[in-house]
Amino acid sequence: MKLMHITTSAFAIAALSAGAASARDQVQITGSSTVLPYATIVAEAFGENFDFPTPVVEGGGSGAGRAKMCEGVGENTVDIANSSSRISQKDLDTCAANGVNEVMEVRIGYDGIVFASDVAGPAFAFTPADIYNAIGEQVLKDGALVANPHTQWAEFNPNLPAQDILMLVPGTKHGTREVFDTRVIIAGCEESGAMKAMMDAGMDEDAAEEGCMKLRTDGRSVDIDGDYTETLARLDADKNAVGVFGLSFYQNNTDKLQVATMSGIVPSTESIASGEYPVSRPLYFYVKLAHMDVIPGLKEYVEFFVSDDMAGPNGPLAQYGLVSDPELAATQAMVAARTPMGPLE
Amino acid sequence: MTDISAAGAVPATKPKNSLFVQDDLTRRRNAAETRFKYYGIVAIVLSLSVLAVMLFTIFRDGTSAFRQASVAFPITLEAEILDPKGARDPADLAKVTTIGYGNLIGQQFANFLIAEGIAVEGISDKDISGMISRDAPGRLRDMVLADPSLIGQTIDFNAYATGRIDGYMKGRVTLETAELDRNVSLEQLQLADKLIAAGILTSGFNTGFLTNPDASDQRPESAGLGVAIIGSLYMMMLVLIFTLPVGVAASIYLEEFAPKNRLTDLIEVNISNLAAVPSIVFGILGLAIFINFAGLPQSSSLVGALVISLMTLPTIIIATRAAIRAVPPSIRDAALGVGASKMQTVFHHVLPLAMPGILTGTILGLASALGETAPLLLIGMVAFVTNYPSGPFDGGVLDPATALPVQVYSWASRSDPAFIERSSGAIIVLLAFLVIMNVAAILLRRRFERRW
C-alpha cells in the first residue's frame, strides 16, 4: 500500500505546516515597480550587512501595493508599501477602517521623467507645448480649435525635425502617467493656448483640463501598459518613436537612447534636484508603525534605507538614478522619532 | 436498349466517362485533394518555423548567460581596516560594512595592477574599482566573518567582472556603444583588453547562474537561479504529493465504484470545466483561502504548491481516468470471476496496468504546472528573494521563494541589458527541465505500456 503511505505523509506535512505557519522573520515589501529597483538595492545591501534575512520585495504597482498594506495589521499583511505617487485620503480611510491607524510616510527622493528617442535619430528639444501639439486631441491651429491634424513634428515647430509623430506614453494604470498628464500635457495645453480657447468656448476650468488630458486616438500616441522595457522594444521596432522613460532607465540604456531637453533643460540628477527640470515626482514608501517592533529587522531596514550611505547623494541609489532628497536629514529625524503622517490636506 | 445503340452510333470520339481521362468534376476533386495536402504541409512548416524562430532567438540571446567574466587577484586582508580594535570580536568585525570591504577591494586591485605594471592612461581609481562586481564586498565580508583567522593574510580572490565588462567579452558592449554609455568608460575597456592579455580577466562557465540567488539591478553579473530552482523543486514535489493520491483516488472512484447517475455526470462535467478555468482564477482563490483565511505565509512555496495543485488536479484526474478506462474489461471480469473483491481487482490488476498512463499524465500535468506564473503573481511569489529557503524538513516550504518562470518574468522587466540575456538563459534552463520531464514521460510509456 504505497499509495496509503504517500497519502498519510501528505496529510502529515499539511498538518505540520499549518501548525508552523507563524512568526515571520523577514520584512515584506510590495508596491510600485518604479521604486522596486531602489528597494531591491537597499534590501540586498541590508541582507549583506545585517544579521536579519533579506527583505522580500514585490512589484505590482503603487495603488495595488497601498491597498495591500491597508488590508490590516498582522503577520500575514505586508509591512511596507512602495509608492511612486502620494497616498490618497481614500487609501488612508481604508487603512483606518481595517485597523491600520498609524502609517509613516517616508520620501526617499525624486525620480525624473524623460523623453528619449533612438540614439541614431535626430535630437529633440521639446517644450510642453510641443508635446501637447503632437498628441493632444484638440489643438489650436490658426487661432481655432481643431482635431489634431499634425503628422510631423516640424509642422508646428520648425525647430523640430521633419519626422513622423509617434509618441509612446505610459498607460493610465502607471503612476508615471499622472505626472506626465499634469506636468507635460496640461502645462502644454496652457502654453499652446488650447486651454484658453477651450475656456473661451464655454468650458469651465475642470472641463478644460479634462479636455486637455484627452490624447489623440489615431495611433500617433500609443499607451504602453507594460514597463519601460516594452517602451524600449517598441522604440527599437519603430525608430521614429519618442518614448517616455524614467531617468534611471534612460541612464542604464544611454547606448540605445538619446534624451530630449525639456524647455531647454537637459534632465540629470542635478537639474532635477535643483528643480530646473520640470518633469519629476517624489517617490515614497509607507510603513505600518504597528509592525515596527514586531517584525524583526523592519526598524533597521527603514533606518538603513534613509541613511546617507544609501539614499545620500553619493550612495548607490543616486548612482542608479534616484535624485536624492535635499531634506534627507529631516526624513532621518522623522524615521528616528517614528512620526506617523497626519491627515492629508 | 435501342436508344443506346442509336446513341452509340452518333459520336465516333472517345466515350464521355473514362477512367483514363479525367472529367471536369474529377479533376477539381483531385486538385482539391492535392491542395488540402499542401495546406497541411504549409501548416506544419509554419508551426515548425515559429518554433524554430523562437528557439533560435532564445538560444542566440541566452547561451551567453552561461558564461561569465571574472577577475582573479590577490587581496591582503588588512587588519587595521577590517578589525581596527584587533580583538577579533565578531561584533566588532560585523561593524565593518560592505562599503569598507568595497574600498579595500578597489584599493587592492589598483595596487595589484601597479605591481603587475598594467596601466591605462587617464583611468581613474573609480573606473578601476568599478570593473569589479558590487557583490564582491559582500562575499568577502561573509568569508571573513565565517573565518576571522583570514585577517592579515593574503588570499587569492576571484571576483565577477561587472555586467558591462562581461558584455564586452561577449561582444554585447563595443567601443562604439561604450562611448555613449555612462556605465562604462573607454579606459575601462582598454584596461579590460590588457587584463585579458595578461590572463587576469577570464571568462568561464557560469556556475553562479545556476546556484546564486537573485541580485539587484546594479549587479546583474551575480544574479542566478538558485532560489528559483529550489522554489520550483519544492513546489513540484509538493504538487506531486498533493495531487497524485487525490487524483488517483478520485479517478478510481469515478471509474470503478461510482453509480451511473445524474450526480456522477454532474461531477464529471465539472471536473472537465475545472480543467479549463484560467489559472489566474486559482491564484485569487489561493490568496483568499490559503493566505487570508488559513493564514499560511505569503510568498512560500507551500501556498504556491497548493494553488498549482488545484490547477493540476483536473488534468491528472482526466488523464488517470483515461488510463483506467483503457484497461480492458476482460481483466476485471477475470479477476472478479476467480473471486477477487472489487478493491482487490482494482489494486491488484487495474491500477498496475493503468500505472504507465497515470504517470505519463501526471508528469505532463507537472510540466505544465512548472511553467505557470499567473497564479503565483497573486500569492506574492513574483518577488525579489535572495535568501535560500531552508531544507524541506526544516520548514523550507514555508520560506519565501520564487519559481523559474517568475524569474524569467522579473528579469525581463529590468532595465540593464545584461538581465535580458539572463532572462533568456533562464528560459533555456526552464526548457531543459521541461524536456527532461517530457522525455521521462515518453520513456515510462515506452517501457511499461502494454497493448491488447
Image (tube, rainbow, N blue to C red):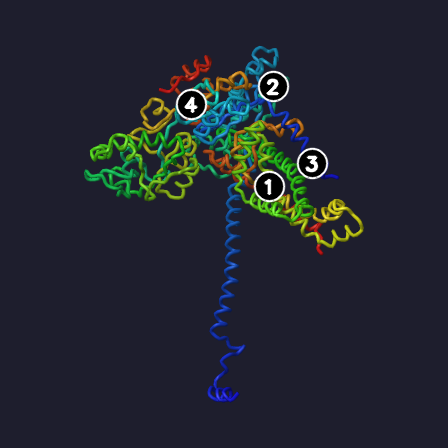
Residue B23 % position (x, y): 48, 75
Whether residue B429 appears in this view of the structure is: no
Of discs 2 and 4, which sits in the foreground?
4
Q: Give, as a three-letter code, the residue at label 1.
A: Thr
Name the image quarter holding residue B143.
top right
Residue on which the image places disc 2: B145
> Element under label 3?
helix
Left or right of residue A199, residue B220 in this image: right
Chain letter behind tag 2? B
Residue on which the image places disc 3: A7
C-alpha distance separating marks 3 and 4: 47 Å
Chain letter behind tag 1? B
Residue at the far left: name it. A143
The disc, 1 or 2, on the residue closer to the chain's N-terminal end is 2
Of discs 2 and 3, which sits in the foreground?
3
Of discs 1 and 2, which sits in the foreground?
1
Q: For the N terminus of chain A, which image quadrant?
A: top right
Is the residue at mark 3 from the same chain as the one at mark 4?
A: yes
Residue on which the image places disc 4: A93
Name the image quarter holding residue A34.
top left
Residue B308 % position (x, y): 58, 37
- State the residue at coordinates (67%, 39%): B245
Q: Which mark is residue B312?
A: 1
Q: In this view, does A296 lie above or below B208?
A: above
Of discs 1 and 4, which sits in the foreground?
4
Q: Give, as a three-letter code, the residue at label 4.
A: Asp
Q: Is residue B170 above or below residue B255?
A: above
C-alpha distance separating marks 2 and 4: 47 Å
Q: Are marks 1 and 3 in contact (CB under 8 Å)?
A: no
